[in-house]
Image (spheres, helix red, strand yellow):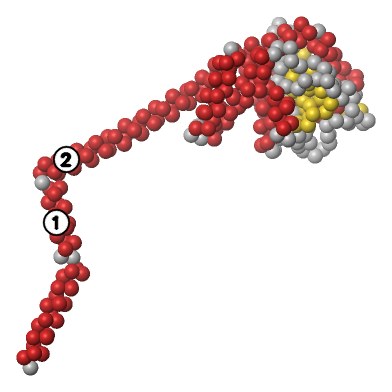
Amino acid sequence: MLEELKELARLLAARADTAPDIAAADRARRLRGHVEEFLIPRAADLDAPLFVVILGSTGSGKSSLFNGLAGADLSQTGVLRPTTRTARALASPDASLPPVVVQLETEGELVVVRDDAGWSDLVIVDAPDFDSIEESNRTLARRLLEAADLIVFVTTDTRYADEVPWSILHRAGERGVPLLTVINRLPAAPEDRKLVLDDYHRLLGEANLTGLSATVPVEVVGVPLGAVDSATSGLTRDAVEPVRRALEALVDDAEARRLLVRQSLESAIADLPNGVGEIVTEMDLEDHARKELLRIAANAYDGRWSDIGDQIDRGSFLRSEVLREWQDYVGANRVARVVSEGVGKIAASIRAVF
């Protein structure tokens, strides 16, 4: 399978270079990135560290969750938007890094933080906002989405039903990537908090999204408003404990981790024909348009060539050419010169007589 995936990546690269428009090139480029940065490395090594990506919309509290899990102020938080301009990865000092993390670090798009707060079998990334005003941030967030083994999705009580976050969740569903979700800043009143959580559970169930295993619904962690630790610029330890517990259960259980990785990989491979099929359909339409243009050009050329043949048969084509040459010969400049020379000779003759 690895060789087939590598060949697919090569073909997608060629498609991206020759696509007739930017949108088609971007589709091929994104799918190629998914193949090269997730499918190939994960298929080659199911036991590589789990790659977890924290995704969320602007101001949802992704960096606060990241800092809370790390127990340290590692990722910038605040009111300035977008706050996260460069992705940050947390890993233990001895952890190996996924290829996409190595590549992004080389490109200057990601900073790796080696810290004892990290895990040896898990690398977690605080991604930029996927709805950022900066296109580069949106592109990076989607690139990380395509490479993740597990997504921790962060939203708020006022934005959990927004269209843009759900476009990301639907893509996660297409990929079949396991999800853990966090609703931040829940209202203090228990009845209000329950209303939000129940509605979010309903939306997740209708979307048929995948939890930490194929048979488990998506887990939703509720975080109350104001659960912030000023010392770490992150969520409090109690607030992030359910997320930490879920991640550490995967770290401690190699078989559970392998099952999750296999689930993510198999789902991504199952979705691959959809992405490839979309590109093939585009190329078929382009080929049809190309053939139609060639047909139109050939018909126009053949018709004109037939007209020329008819004119040659009637002699009108050559007659027209001879007339054109004669008209050039007796053109205004040549006639004027002949007349001028004739008048000059007559004048000279008259002067000679007198």
Please name whichever residue, 76 or 265, is drawn nearer the observer in this view of the structure. 265
The answer to whether residue 194 of the structure is visible from this angle is no
Q: Is residue 227 left or right of residue 10?
A: right
Identify which residue is drawn at 67% across, 18% down: 41
How many neighbours does mark 1 have within 10 angstroms: few (below 14), some (14-19), or many (20 or more)?
A: few
- Mark-to-mark CA distance, 1 and 2: 19 Å
How many neighbours does mark 2 have within 10 angstroms: few (below 14), some (14-19), or many (20 or more)?
A: few
Residue 165 appears in which quarter of the rendering?
Answer: top right
Please name whichever residue, 212 or 12, is drawn nearer the observer in this view of the structure. 12
Task: Please say if 212 is above or below 339.
Answer: above
Task: Please say if 37 is above or below 76.
Answer: above
Which element type, helix, strand or loop, lies under badge 2?
helix
Q: Label 1, on which residue?
A: 323
Task: Please say if 246 is above or below 73.
Answer: above
Q: Label 2, on which residue?
A: 309
The quadrant of the picture occupied by the C terminus is bottom left
Which amino acid, mark 1?
Leu
**Residue 262 horizontal/vertical position (percent):** 69, 10
The quadrant of the picture occupied by the N terminus is top right
**Residue 114 horizontal/vertical position (percent):** 84, 26
Residue 306 appears in which quarter of the rendering?
Answer: top left
